[in-house]
């Protein structure tokens, strides 16, 4: 049994790789650097240097019979300067993966989309909620929605069998760049303030397991929301602060203040060319109240929701083991 995994060196990709190898599956991957290829090679991965933006590289990897493609790679950055690169990766890269699967006879694609494909809606998201991301002013939401459409269109056309997963906010051990930044700022007493929104916080380990379950699912053309504990960002920050033994914030910053501050930083960045510490896109996400119904995934993929306290604890234990946190 052989699969191809994109995004194998990322936060979620590493966990999925572990699940696949634990199941005895051979894994091939496309990586951008020689160092990454050597690292994965030591783990028994058939790593090829290149990019999903290069159709030739994908054809090379898939020249060996492959049972499934797990498409996890994505550009998640939240600054308008990255929009062109993000569009190439998220849309054209996905198009290349789908085309390569068709040309190589790979029948199954498990595609990692995002709740962002739905846009920002007031009601709790279900799989039947409208996908409004295509109309979003936020490039990440727009590109994830379009990429998801490409995969489902290929399934509907009978070219591949596709399953789409829509994770919410992903937390857990192994994170160094995403929500881990919040852990580090709290640990260093540098968190400038708490946004007033809320989210659904999902365990990266359970998302990886759900992807393997989705591969084995008999049905196709299905989408699955992978949410988690519903909590405000204030509740999340307070939970992290308690775990780290740091000062616990008592209230949030006003959304209007955050939006105005982000606009000022964005204007400055246009002059300096330096990425701002806070972008209008990031503020939009963290001022929104995201609610996700994971019932379908829990029933059909045996998806599980980890309590927030356990998820925060496990993340802190991992970060401390890496030397990224101060001692209590």
Image (cartoon, rainbow, N blue to C red):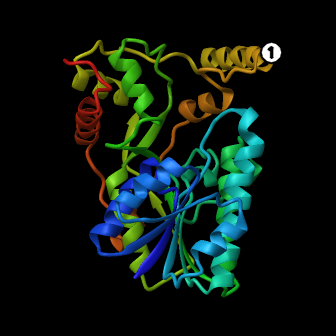
Q: Position of residue 197 (x, y in %)?
A: 50, 31
Question: Outermost residue toward the right?
Answer: 271
Foreground residue among 121 and 150: 150
Foreground residue among 309 and 216: 216
Please give the count of numbered marks on the rendered protein. 1
- Which residue is at a point 29% across and 23% down the rendered structure image? 325
Q: Quadrant of residue 51?
A: bottom right
- Which residue is at a point 22% across and 41% down the rendered structure image? 310
The reply to whether residue 149 is in sight is no
Q: Position of residue 80 (x, y in %)?
A: 74, 34
- Which residue is at a point 27% across and 68% down the rendered structure image? 22
The image quadrant where one finds the C terminus is top left
In this rendering, position of residue 74 left or right of residue 266: left
Q: Quadrant of residue 181?
A: top left
**Badge 1 local density, few (<14 within 10 Å), some, or many (20+)?**
few
Q: Tell me: residue 81, above or below residue 292.
A: above
Q: Position of residue 167 (x, y in %)?
A: 48, 54
Q: Quadrant of residue 294?
A: bottom left
Q: Position of residue 222 (x, y in %)?
A: 53, 74
Question: Outermost residue toward the left?
Answer: 328
- Which residue is at a point 55% across and 17% down the rendered structure image? 254
Q: Tell me: residue 286, above or below residue 242.
A: below
Q: Which residue is mark 1?
A: 271
């Amino acid at each position: 049994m052989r699969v191809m995994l994109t995004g194998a060196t990322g936060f979620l990709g590493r966990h999925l790789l572990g699940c696949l190898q634990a199941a005895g599956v051979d894994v091939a991957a496309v990586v951008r650097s020689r160092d990454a290829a050597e690292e994965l090679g030591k783990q028994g991965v058939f790593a090829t240097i290149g990019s999903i933006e290069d159709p030739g590289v994908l054809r090379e990897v898939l020249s060996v019979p492959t049972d499934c493609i797990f498409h996890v790679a994505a550009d998640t950055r939240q600054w308008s300067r990255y929009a062109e690169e993000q569009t190439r990766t998220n849309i054209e890269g996905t198009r290349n993966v789908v085309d390569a699967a068709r040309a190589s006879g790979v029948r199954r694609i498990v595609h990692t989309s995002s709740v962002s494909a739905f846009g920002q809606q007031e009601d709790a998201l279900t799989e039947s909620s409208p996908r409004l991301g295509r109309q979003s002013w936020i490039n990440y939401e727009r590109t994830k929605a379009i990429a998801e459409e490409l995969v489902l269109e290929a399934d509907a056309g009978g070219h591949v069998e596709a399953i789409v997963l829509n994770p919410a906010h992903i937390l857990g051990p192994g994170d160094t760049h995403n929500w881990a930044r919040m852990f580090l700022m709290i640990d260093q007493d540098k968190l400038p303030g708490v946004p007033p929104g809320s989210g659904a916080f999902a365990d990266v380990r359970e998302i990886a397991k759900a992807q393997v379950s989705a591969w084995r699912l008999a049905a196709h053309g299905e989408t699955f929301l992978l949410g988690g504990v519903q909590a405000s960002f204030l509740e999340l920050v307070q939970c992290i602060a308690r775990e780290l033994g740091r000062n616990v914030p008592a209230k949030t910053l006003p959304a209007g203040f955050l939006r105005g501050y982000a606009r000022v930083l964005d204007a400055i960045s246009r002059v300096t060319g330096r990425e701002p510490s806070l972008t209008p896109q990031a503020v939009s996400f963290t001022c929104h109240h995201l609610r996700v119904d994971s019932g379908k995934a829990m029933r059909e993929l045996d998806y599980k929701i980890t309590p927030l306290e356990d998820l925060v604890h496990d993340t802190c234990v991992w970060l401390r083991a890496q030397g990224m946190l101060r001692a209590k």
